[in-house]
Image: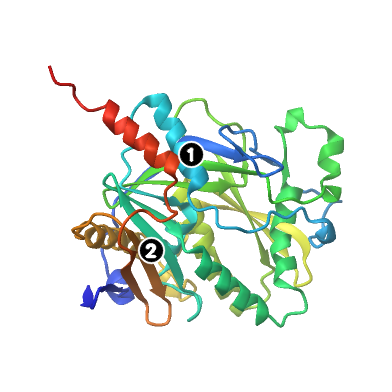
Amino acid sequence: MAQNSNVARFPIDVIRLTAATTQAPVKRPREFTCFSYDKNHNLRLDDSSIKWYYPPQPPALPANLSAGFDKFDKHDSQDEHLDSLLTAIAHHEQQTNQRIDAKFVTWRGMMTKFLIAPYPYDDDDGFEMNATLFQDCIFIEENWVFAAEKKAKQNSGWKGPISQEEMTFWGYKFETLATIPRPWAETSREVIENRGDEVVSNKEQYCSVVRSEIGGKVLCFGGEVDAIWDMKPKEPGAKINWVELKTSKVIQSPRDKFQFNKKLMKFWAQSFLLGVPKIVVGWRDKKGMLVSCEEYETKEIDERVRRERDGGQWPWMPWVCVNFASEILDWIQQVIKADPQQSGVWRIRFDAKSKVVELFKVEETGHGRILTDEFVNWRTRLASSNQPQDG
């Protein structure tokens, strides 16, 4: 770690990480609470928005993934911070009357960025996050302004025949074609066969909130889950057969194969973090026609990469991702906790070109908008009620 002014820097040494003979220990993520967004994107502290996986079958294939784009019921992107995640955590703590033991709280998306940072797609594949320390736990959110500006820049520079907005819609359309609202036995044939005519919406979501450990650090993060394979177990913390749904262009050349293997890194990281055992890829052509589906076991992706690492087909290594995530969290914790004020907002910035992570303070006091007043007040009351009484 190098220091310059008040900016701490952590360079990513991929060569050193690749040469590692061991991987940081990881504990299986266990869901301890959840929440849903309903069809109007209103928060519900339940699992009402779970979808069941049921793939499209011939004659529904091939299917036009652009069908219905003009009627897309789109949730307008906005900075929602950690609000819903904090609400779900507080609700769980109110039921147990005990604070969760996490040292980091964030979204699954932020943890994914940490895992795949050693292998950026290009020089523009950087990110920014905001962090704050509260009650010995570091809360991390995306710097939404940076992310929005980056997305606008990418869209303005896009010269493809199909807009990026429409191509993003393809993923939501695939989710609509590959899921049903209730288990198969409770779903009518009419609902299953008419999924292609259903209005596509990204407002309704199910989010799993898990406790996990990487390198001995207890983490709590929430993330959207696309579907479930069978039924959600009643036993708390039991393995859940979630399914992650993705689309990708049909492989037609060695270059296509290499690019897909690189894309598979993000698929793996997202699923690995939430404990999703199965990834289903919807193969499409360049015009957005869905032609087939293929299932991947998350753990087998890890094993396959390790087995074929010397064949030159895999541009990433899973243990590099895990070890870097462990190291960067250690470093962030060390820098922030060394601050004598133990307060304020920090910026985490990753420059993909130089492969350097920077950490610096942007607000000297408070928690910015990372924490809600309701969450801070709840935690303050909880700490007070758990204090030993004199006498």
Real-space CA distance between mark 2 and mark 1, rounded to the nearest whole angstrom: 30 Å
Quadrant location, the C terminus: top left
Q: Hey, which residue is sitting farthest left in the picture?
A: 391
Q: Is residue 99 visible?
A: no
- 56 left or right of 98? right
Across and down, in percent, residue 77 comes to 63, 59
Nearest the camera: 149 or 235?
Answer: 149
Q: Residue at x 48, y 81 (%)?
A: 123
Task: Tell me the residue that label 1 is attached to.
Answer: 87
Give the residue type that dot 1 points to. Answer: Thr
Disc 1, SS: helix
Across and down, in percent, residue 214 comes to 32, 51
Image: 240 above or below 22? above
Task: Tell me the residue that label 2 is attached to.
Answer: 321
Across and down, in percent, residue 244 comes to 59, 50
Dot 2, crowdedness within 10 Å: few (<14), some or many (≥20)? Answer: many
| Label number found at residue 301 | none
Instruction: Identify the image quadrant of residue 390.
Output: top left
Instruction: Identify the image quadrant of residue 366.
Output: bottom left
Nearest the camera: 365 or 95?
Answer: 365
Q: Residue at x 31, y 39 (%)?
A: 101
Nearest the camera: 160 or 75?
Answer: 75
